[in-house]
Image: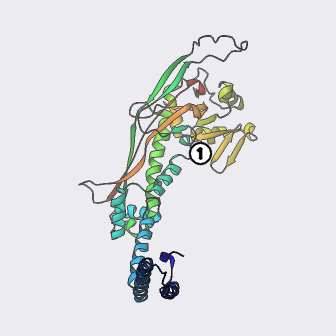
Amino acid sequence: MEIKEMMMEDIQKRMSEINSLLESEDADVDALTEEVNQLEARSAEIKANAEKRSELASKIAAGEIGKVVQAVEERKENEKMFEINSVEYRDAWVKKLIGRDLSAEERAALASAGAVIPTMTVNAIWDKLVKPAELLGKVDVSQFPTYVRFPKATTNNAATAQAVGAPISESSDVVGYVDLIPNEYVKLLTVGADIDHMAIPAIHDWIVDNLVGQIRYAINKDIVVGTGTNALKGLATSVTASATAIPATLTKAALLKIMGALGAQYQNGAVWIMTPAMFFEEVMTLTALNDYIINNGFEYKLFGHDVVLMSECSISSKETIFYGDPKAYKVNIFKPLEVKPFETATSTNIQFRGATLADGELLDTAAFVRFAKA
């Protein structure tokens, strides 16, 4: 056994053996002397370690070291609680937004994160912004942060069959581009004194619901009637109305004619877009359509295709129906909706500013047909 691995009983045993060896005339005194010195050093090391263990045990028993460990653990737990995806961080962010007092931990968390919008809020905003029953939930939505260009085939010839391995003829397709450029959609929300009596989670949901609802409505509206100037370019701007008018008295045949005007390649995902007046007062009252209308709460289908209700489909005082594939309409959200306090010298109310950057345009004008009443 090596000396550095020996315990006290091993050292004492070896010392006894060395004492016996010294009685022999042939003993190597120098070597034994060196070994004894090493054994004494190992013995001193064992005694020093024993004293250190005893001192450490006394401190732990007195609670001196335990308090330090507990403080470190508590600090780590607090840091974890105030990550930007936590409820605690969200509540601190809302408190700062409405001017309520913050604890030291909340102030530190917001300062460390740069007071960025909480992950929970970002997710809630997106879920409420892109609702499946509305146009924004059906069109093709992307989230590129800067100016973006999408190809748009102005002439798109059909694929052709040819012999295997034959040279490919040059395509006569003509490809243009749609450039989407940020437009700001903004809403100021004024909060009354009753907000002081609301719980923080309720305030958070109230702010998100109201700001997102208003901005979502503005974007949905512009998908239909946006001019393309500081706004989305809407269907009404891109799709030419059919020369065939919707008859004064709506019929099943007139609706089927609208469906038949759309190319087969767009039929699978097509939706109806019309005003509530057109749908409820004329379409729903046609007894011939009883078997072709599905009502699931406030979500409707006509001939198996979703119906999107938009008051903006009364264009130039004419009831208008759009029918087509919404995936051909491209929307880009350049910046997620952000919420900030809005201060003005003329108001003592609490106000919030919600804003997002977006643009959109129809990439394929053949994907929609448009019919209007005479």
Who is closer to the viewer here, 313 or 71? 71
Compared with residue 187, is residue 191 higher up or lower down, i.e. above or below? below
> Is residue 333 toward the left or the right of residue 196 in the image?
right
The location of residue 202, given as percent across then percent down, is 46, 64
Residue drawn 53% across the image and 51% down it: 127
Who is closer to the viewer here, 190 or 333? 333
Q: Residue furthest left?
A: 345
- In the rendered view of the protein, which quadrant contains the N terminus? bottom right
Few, some or many C-alpha atoms within 10 Å of disc 1 (few <14, some 14-19, many ≥20)?
some
The answer to whether residue 111 is seen in the rendering is yes
Who is closer to the viewer here, 325 or 280? 325
The residue to which callout 1 is attached is 133
Name which residue type carries label 1: Ala
The location of residue 116, given as percent across then percent down, is 38, 54
Residue drawn 27% across the image and 56% down it: 347
The location of residue 73, given as percent across then percent down, is 43, 73
Q: Based on the displayed image, in which of its 4 quarters is residue 200 positioned?
A: bottom left
- In the rendered view of the protein, which quadrant contains the C terminus? top right
Residue drawn 42% across the image and 78% down it: 38
